[in-house]
Amino acid sequence: MMKTVRIGAAQGFYGDTIEPAVDIAKNGNVDYISFDCLAELTMSILVKDKLKDPTKGYTKDITTSMKALLPYVKEKGIKLLTNAGGINPEGAYEEVVRVAKELGITGLKIAVVTGDNILERISELRDKGVSFKDMETGDSFETVQDKLLFANAYLGVKPIVEALHQGADIVVTGRTTDTAQFLAPLVYEFGWKEDDWDRLAQGILMGHLMECSAQSTGGNFSGNWWDVEDMDRIGYPIAEVKENGDFILTKTETSGGMVNFDTIKEQMLYEIHDPAAYITPDVVANFTTAKLEEIGKNRIFITGTTGSPRPDTLKVVMGYPNGYRGQVIIGYSWPDAVKKVKKAESIIRKQIEQRGIKIEEIMVDYIGHNALHGPTAAPPTEEDGLNEVFMRMAVRTKSYQDAEKFRRLVVPLGLNGPPYGGGLNGVRPRTLLGMWASLVPREFIEDEVKVQVKEVEKIAESSTK
């Protein structure tokens, strides 16, 4: 009989609710629960945390997640795989150990994967010939090299699989691909080879369908979302995967939500530039060959994904200070709400020029009209009959002082601008981080990746590459 591995999804981002993952732990009969906690934005948040406190730099909600799930690791043998380590996976590991001890749980083997952080290796890699030119624009790296705050390569499944081979119950990593935590159990359990491209591609599709928590089970669904049952207790997806890579995507019967053709197809295309060539460190997956079959309520059978050899390079994302953001908000009521808010915008623009405030970039939107649709929405007119209009104006400046000067322009409009204004709000300036993406030969990264597995209380069991 063909072996089956059951994997449940946990958080799809830093801050996602953990309750559906707890439901999976209780009622999902799963072998693994996998998290995807990181986005480029998240790395920026975490690096700011670490600059304030060197012991931080991991997702803070790992504390609540582990408190909720560690009892099931011990009781049911469920393994947890998470990239919550962010900028500081060692710090995240220490926090997991602390939580385990607080709960009185001992004997757990916890792995930490390091080596994705290459900030201190930039010069060495440059000497080896890595250009680090921007992979989208081709811009020269020299423009940002001396300003970098973080630089992390996207790792694939290899170190996670190594940690599982060493007996880890919990694996904490830094920057891995969104799908790595989901594919790794399959490679470990089934012994899939590095060049088993079609099975790896099936695993990548499964991971892609799981990585965004409830987006496969009716969350953020643009179809008949009103038919999604019990969205207040929506469930996260579960995959039942066979050794040949075929899998069923479903959810627990105790949770709300909906799994059908449309929810799955929508997630298949989420964040995908080319469905025929989804590039990961483990395989280039072709989602266009996948076949979906609805075999029961909330059960979709998926097969047929094909793959081709993995790339010789890994993606690296780096962050650097890119000025400051200033933001102001003001609203006006009927009558002539549009005319009033346009006047307020005109006043602020003139005052920026009069006061010599240096602005690098400016963005204006009218909340309720084009704040979400941007330039695809026609400019508002009085004929639109808007009852009220809020203007949000945001700027990017090189200096904190200029952003602060801009912020102070909005409040005086309460007495010095058009009538019937309200909701005046100037947000204190915030540091902006620019993102720089590049490629680096994978051997330069993977040769330095380390996996350490330690047991709570005993500590220090092994260390291998």
Image (cartoon, rainbow, N blue to C red):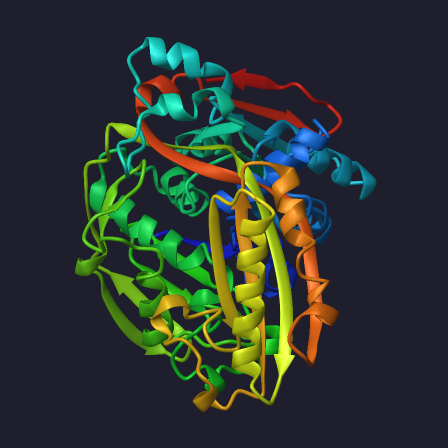
Asked whether 23 or 4 is in front, the reply is 23
Report how many numbered discs are placed on residues in the image. Answer: 0
Residue 81 visible within the image: no
Left or right: residue 1 compared with residue 448: left
Residue 345: name its quadrant.
bottom right
Task: Give the x, y percent position of residue 1.
Answer: 33, 55
Residue in view at x 44 percent, y 90 percent: 383
Q: Is residue 353 above or below residue 462?
A: below
Instruction: Examine the image and state in which quarter residue 142 appears.
Output: top left
* Picture residue at 27% right of the left edge, 33% below the top: 194
**For this rendering, which residue is in front, 140 or 105?**
140
- On the image, the x and y values in percent for residue 249 come to 39, 65
The correct choice, above or below, for 220 with respect to 305 in the image is below
Q: Where's residue 337, x and y in %? A: 57, 83
Tell me which residue sits at (62%, 32%) in the image.
110
Compared across the picture, whether 411 is left or right of 211 comes to right
Q: Which quarter of the picture shows residue 195?
A: top left
User: Where is residue 136 drawn, in percent x and y?
Assistant: 28, 39
Residue 59 sits above or below residue 127 on the image: below
In this view of the protein, can residue 70 be seen by the observer? yes
Residue 6 left/right relative to 248? right
Front-lying residue, 2 or 268: 268
